Image (cartoon, rainbow, N blue to C red):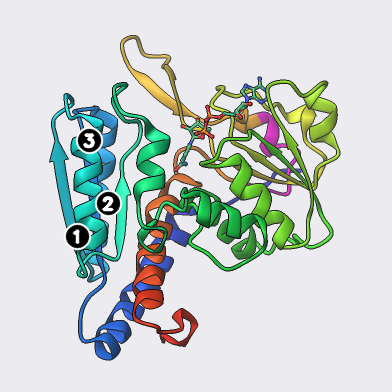
C-alpha cells in the first residue's frame, strides 16, 4: 500500500486564489483593502525569507502589506511601543510579530500586547481561550492549514482517533483544539509520553509537530491513517556541505503504510502563509462587521 501524497502547494495556491476573489468582494463592501503588517526584529536569515514571502503573497492576494524591520538590539519597550501604534492604526487589520524574538524581549508580553482583534497569529490568550471553548476566533495559521489539508483530502475527522505529537501554543495545542471542535477523539502526546509508538499506532490521524527529524517511523502508523507532518528540520544532506529539509515523520516508511500523507517540503509549509492571508481577511471582516462567509 502506498499513501496518497497531499499536495500542500496546490491546496495553498487554490486557497490564495479564493482569498484574492474575496478581497475584491471585501473592498466593494468596506471601500478599503485589508492590511497586514509584519514586524521583524533582528536579522535571522530564515525569518527574513519567510517575511519576504509573506509580503509577496499578501500583495498578490490584493491586500496591503507592510513590513517594519527593527534592529536586533530593539528593547522590549520599543517593540511594545511599535505594537501599540499598530493597534491604534485603523488601516492595520493584522499584526504579526515574527518569532523567534531576540532574547532581551519577553515573547509572551508581546503576544499579550497585540490587540486580539488584530492577532492574525491567533496566539493571544483571548483567542487561544476562545478556541479552547469552541468559540469562533482568529486561529493559529499552521493548525488551520493542517485542518484544511485533512478536509481537502477527504479525511473523516468526526469520530476519528487523532494523536497530536507536540504541545506548543503555536501548533500542538491549537491543532488539538481544532480536531476536538471537529469531533475527533484527541490525544496530545509530548516529550514525557510513555511508548509514543504504541500511542501513535492507535491513531486514524497523526499530526506530528515535534521538531525532531524523522522521529515517527512507518511501524508507528496504523494502516490507512492520515499523517500530517508539520516538522521542518534541516539535516546534513548526502552531498557534503549541503543541508536538506525533512519532517518529523520518516516519509518513505510512513508512506508505505498510511492512507494519505503530507511531504516535507510541499505539505503543511505552504499552507501557513495562505492561512495568514485568510486570517487577515477574517480580521478585516470582523472589524468591518462583515460576515466572512458572506464574501463570494
Ligand atoms: P516546539 O519546540 O515549541 O514544541 C515541540 C513539542 O514537541 C513540545 O511540546 C515537546 O513536548 C514535544 N516533543 C519534543 N520531543 C519529543 C519527543 N521525543 N517525543 C514526543 N514529543 C516531543 O515546536 P513547534 O513550534 O510546535 O514546532 C514543531 C515543528 O514544527 C518544528 O519542526 C517547527 O519547525 C515546525 N513548524 C512548522 C511550521 C510550518 O509552517 N510548517 C510552523 C510552525 C512550526
- Name the side, left or right, on which 127 lies relative to 279: right
Residue 74 location, x and y as percent?
Answer: 17, 29
Could you tell me which residue is drawn at 68 percent across and 27 percent down?
Answer: 216
Q: Which residue is mark 1?
A: 65
Which picture quadrant has residue 1? Answer: top right
Q: Is residue 214 above or below residue 22?
A: above
Going 21% across and 70% down the picture, which residue do you hit?
Answer: 90
- In three-dimensional space, the C-alpha distance between marks 2 and 3, rounded to whole angstroms, equals 26 Å
Say whether mark 3 is within 8 Å of ligand 1: no
Magenta segment boundaries in residue numbering: 253-261
The structure residue drawn at horizontal position 31% and vertical position 40%, both measured from the top left corner, is: 98
Quote the CA–CA distance across marks 2 and 1: 8 Å
Q: Crowding near pointer 3: few (<14 within 10 Å), some, many (20+)?
A: few
**Image height of 25 relative to 284, above or below:** below
Q: Which mark is residue 77?
A: 3
Measuring from the top left, give residue 178's x and y in whole percent: 65, 56
Residue 171 colored in magenta in the image:
no
* Dots 2, 3 in contact, CB < 8 A: no
- As drawn, the residue found furthest toward the top would be 240
Dot placed on the residue nearer the N-terminal end, 2 or 1? 2
Q: Which mark is residue 148?
A: none
Alpha-carbon distance for marks 1 and 3? 24 Å
Q: Secondary structure at mark 2?
A: helix
Q: From the viewer's perspective, is residue 76 above or below residue 125? A: above
Tag 2–tag 1 contact (CB < 8 Å): yes
Mark 2 Cα shell of 10 Å, populated few (<14), some (14-19), many (≥20): many
Q: Secondary structure at mark 1?
A: strand
Q: Which residue is mark 2?
A: 54
Amino acid at each position: 500500500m502506498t499513501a496518497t501524497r497531499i499536495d500542500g502547494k496546490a491546496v495553498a495556491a487554490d486557497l490564495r486564489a479564493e482569498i484574492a476573489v474575496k478581497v475584491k468582494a471585501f473592498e466593494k463592501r468596506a471601500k478599503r483593502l485589508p492590511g497586514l503588517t509584519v514586524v521583524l526584529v533582528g536579522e535571522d536569515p530564515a525569518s527574513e525569507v519567510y517575511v519576504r514571502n509573506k509580503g509577496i503573497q499578501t500583495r498578490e492576494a490584493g491586500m496591503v502589506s507592510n513590513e517594519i524591520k527593527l534592529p536586533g538590539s530593539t528593547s522590549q519597550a520599543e517593540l511594545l511601543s511599535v505594537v501599540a501604534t499598530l493597534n491604534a492604526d485603523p488601516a492595520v487589520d493584522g499584526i504579526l510579530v515574527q518569532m523567534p524574538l531576540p532574547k532581551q524581549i519577553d515573547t509572551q508580553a508581546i503576544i499579550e500586547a497585540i490587540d486580539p482583534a488584530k492577532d492574525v497569529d491567533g496566539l493571544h490568550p483571548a483567542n487561544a481561550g476562545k478556541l479552547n471553548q469552541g468559540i469562533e476566533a482568529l486561529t493559529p495559521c499552521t493548525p488551520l492549514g493542517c485542518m484544511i489539508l485533512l478536509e481537502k483530502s477527504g479525511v473523516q475527522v468526526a469520530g476519528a482517533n487523532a494523536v497530536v505529537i507536540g504541545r506548543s501554543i503555536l501548533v500542538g495545542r491549537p491543532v488539538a483544539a481544532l480536531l476536538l471542535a471537529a469531533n475527533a477523539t484527541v490525544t496530545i502526546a509530548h516529550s514525557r509520553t510513555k511508548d509514543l509508538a504504541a500511542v501513535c499506532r492507535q491513531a486514524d490521524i497523526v499530526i506530528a509537530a515535534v521538531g525532531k527529524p524523522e522521529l515517527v517511523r512507518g511501524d508507528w502508523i496504523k494502516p490507512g491513517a492520515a499523517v500530517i507532518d508539520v516538522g521542518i528540520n534541516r539535516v546534513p544532506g548526502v552531498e557534503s556541505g549541503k543541508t536538506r529539509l525533512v519532517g518529523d515523520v520518516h516519509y518513505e516508511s510512513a508512506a508505505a503504510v498510511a492512507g494519505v500523507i503530507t511531504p516535507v517540503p510541499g505539505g503543511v509549509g505552504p499552507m501557513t502563509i495562505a492561512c495568514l492571508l485568510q486570517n487577515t481577511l477574517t480580521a478585516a471582516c470582523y472589524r468591518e462587521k462583515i460576515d466572512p462567509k458572506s464574501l463570494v
